[in-house]
Image: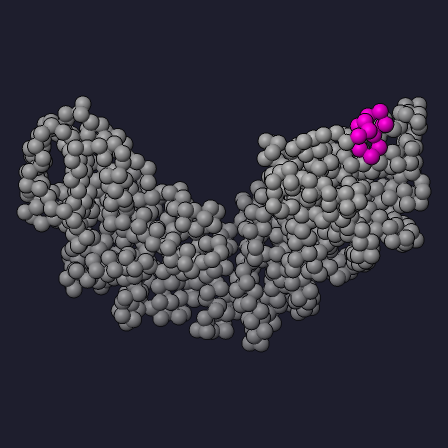
Amino acid sequence: MREPAWAGRLRWALTALAREPLLVLVAGAAGTGKSHLTQRLLEHPETRRAAARLHWAYGPAGHGTPPEELPEGDAPVLLVVEDVHRAAPEELARLRGLLARPRPGLAAVVTYRPEELAAPELPFGAPVDYPSGLTVLRHRVEPWTPEQVRQAASAALGAECCTPEAVDRLWRRSGGVAQVVLDLLAVVRDATPRRCTAAEVDAAGVPVRLAERALGRTAALAPEHRPVVWAAAVLGEPATGAELSAVAGLAPEQGRAALVAALAGAALAEVAEPGAEGDDACGYGGCGGSGRYGFAVPLAARAVHRALPGPVREELHGRAADVLAGRQPVPWPALAQHRRASGRVRPWLRAVEQAARQAADAGRHQEAIGLLERTLASPAVPPTARARLAPMLARSAVVGLRSDQTVEVLSQVVEDEALPAAVRGELRLDLGLLLCNQVGRGSQGWGELERAAAELRTGRPDLAARAMSALAMPYWPGATLATHLEWLAGAEEAAADSGEELVRTAVHVNRAGVALSYGDPRGWKLLADLPAEHADRRVRQHVARGLCNAADSAVWLGHYGRAERLLSDGLALCKKSGAPYTEQTGLGARLLLEWNNGRWAGLAARCEAFVTATADMPVIAADARMVLGLLSVAQGEWRRAASWLTEQTAPTTGHAAAPLAAASSGALVRMALVRQDVAQAAATARDAWDRLAEKGVWVWAADLAPWAVEALCHADDLHGARAMVDAYATGLDGLDAPCAHAGLDWARAVLAEADGEPARAVELYRAASTAFERMPRPYAQALTAEAAARCVLEAGDGPEAGEDAADPQGGDRAWAIAELTACAGRLSELGAMWDAARARSVLRAHQPLEERRPPGRPSYGAQLSPREQEVAELAGTGLTNKEIASTLHLSPRTVEQHVARAMRKLGTASRQELATARDDAEGTDTTGRP
């Protein structure tokens, strides 16, 4: 808690120079932290120097006895009186007397609860005849702000262990009252070993201290006054006096008397309107002017509500429903809740339908999903209502974010034979979309979509078009591109039969998406024709989906500038039209774009945050998981890379989108090659290539082809490598895919090198490097430029560059060394530590003789040698001696000796500590890591 402004003045009053007495009145509701404030004051070093410190508290936990007189003399005296609202009349009179005749050097602090004063705003029970020489200040201990609640949650649960939604829920439920926040956090800490979410805060219930206070204050009221408190508990939100009286079943005069009594007894308080500011927004008794009443701590309502007998509670909810039905606009979600609690089933379901429709129309799909899930889970819902509500849930779930309960509910409802066939087909369609797009059960989802298309084709061409349009998207494994195009043709035919613009737009979006996914240049024209400014929000949602899908395709094709613009427009339209699922897919594509165009600073942290935020949506999280794996490969953190790329939800598994599976497989092939596990590398390459060839979308081979060809060449399968390159070249003919064409040059260069054609290999590596530089794709550019330079140095033959070509004996070698030096620098700047170390090793092996160190071992003393630094870097990432040896072209025995010397010089006990210890020794981070 931040120190109040008057604390410094009080300490000044205790100095020998100060003569003016001071009184500070500290007001605060129960639990707001008054005692904590006074304890800090008493323990402050400056207040400890006071000549006398008198401290007592009233009430059950009180201590000390107020003196008849203060100590004589001129020395400063600190007087602290806590909970003066509990003082007896005679003690209040004694305090009034002390303050009416304050001695010089007195500094007094008096705390109280405004809501429990016998006489409002009179802490001493009656006015005090304060002398003119006494300075009197009043300080109100305000509830905590959301930021203070966040800080308390971090202190209790650990930094970043509480989601923003959980912090907001803590603040709202507690009213910001410090003690309630701390009590809730204590319950959450004991019950939640993982990250705290809003659901965990809800499950924490009502803290015992708060429940007993609320129930005790209610019980202290006369029996005829208690119903107004019960009414407030049932409503669960601030209400007018007239509304409380109506819900309580009291006549206006009776209700007014009961409300006044409840306010006087602090059972209720005048509370602020939502969003109010200033003194009326304090959230506890003593505020004024809002004309609305409720519990000072909102969570207290649950304790009172839970204590009500069932019949009484039902009657109160029934009257609450009648009151809310008269409001304009009608609060449908709250009305549905009260009707259900009062046992009125049909009115409840009508209110649910209205509330869900209103939320969905406003783009609040998660709100609609939650309401409909809870409703459909009830056995009290009859089949006719289920047939109306289930499609509403399905439609919101497809646009909103995934819920396991939604999938479970829809899976049960879709098998209900009592449902009309058209309803069942619509539910099956949306269930299939959920399974494919959000849950990651593509095979099951594909089957549901096929069944939906068949069920709906005759009677509902509009819905059949949606099902076939989804089946046309080629991202999912299993079907061929030709099959997807057949489904697209069927979708276009069904959309035309439907005669609906919305359906035609949805299919048009997917037609553009399919074209761009495999590099058909006509897709850009189709995309430009989308009606982004259409008046119908549902049409704009489809356009937003089209823009975000096109951005994702542009990333895979290598059109990064275009991808950036599409993402900007698509994400803005998602927010404007209310399409949270599509927005998340766009955010995932942005992470993939940042990986490709070299914006690696902080990228790992952004990906990890995205994976956490989308933990229950593996399809959406897949982009971030793959990027984390690729970053780990480049940084040499191979155990971490293997975890991201091969775990159950990794993008290489059978349910993964085809382009992610291909790129991730390329990274796994590369890792196997460095480990010299050629058999594993070749097997992974063949399996991934076969799946991609079956799909027939060759533009997705850019990150697989070079490593797959290299694996087959190392396995002495040059025939298989040539077949890969030939199929790749044929598949790319006529397609607009800069990245894939650069990948083709890269793969051809690998094959030329294996065929013993170094000059052609250099030419192709440089062509790929130039293409990657234009995109720009700096990591691939550096790798291909490095390969070209290495090829020159190993072969002693340079690139053919006409009259500018250098002579083979000197100029080409000088070019290659300069290029390799530049590549090592670029890789270090990116954060590709492992690649940079490999490039430096190649460079060192090919340095001119005159630039190499003279014979004899130089003495580095306690400092690491350059080679020891490289080895320490790589060992610290978790690479084995064999992997480091392969990277640096050394023997495993030599690596073992370097590791031992580095550990001895740096004083580390394990290999894992080497990288950190090395950086500490140098005083800077030289890894270039983001």
Report the residue at 87% width, 34% height from top: 793
Image coordinates of residue 790 in percent, x first then y, are 84, 36
Image coordinates of residue 355 in percent, x first then y, are 44, 58
In terms of secondary structure, what is the magenta stretch mainly? loop
Residue positioned most to the bottom: 417
In which image quadrant can residue 318 be found? bottom left
Is residue 727 visible in the rendered structure shown here? no
Decide if residue 733 is on the left or right side of residue 497: right
Q: Is residue 853 magenta?
A: yes
In which image quadrant can residue 827 be found? top right
Image coordinates of residue 367 in percent, x first then y, are 47, 56
Image coordinates of residue 545 in percent, x first then y, are 63, 49
Is residue 267 visible in the rendered structure shown here? yes
Report the residue at 90% width, 31% height from top: 799
Decide if residue 84 is on the left or right side of residue 240: left
Magenta stretch, residue numbers: 844-856
Q: Nearer the viewer, residue 386 or 440?
A: 440
Q: How is the image coloured?
A: one colour
Q: Nearer the viewer, residue 341 or 757?
A: 757
Q: Disc count in the image?
A: 0
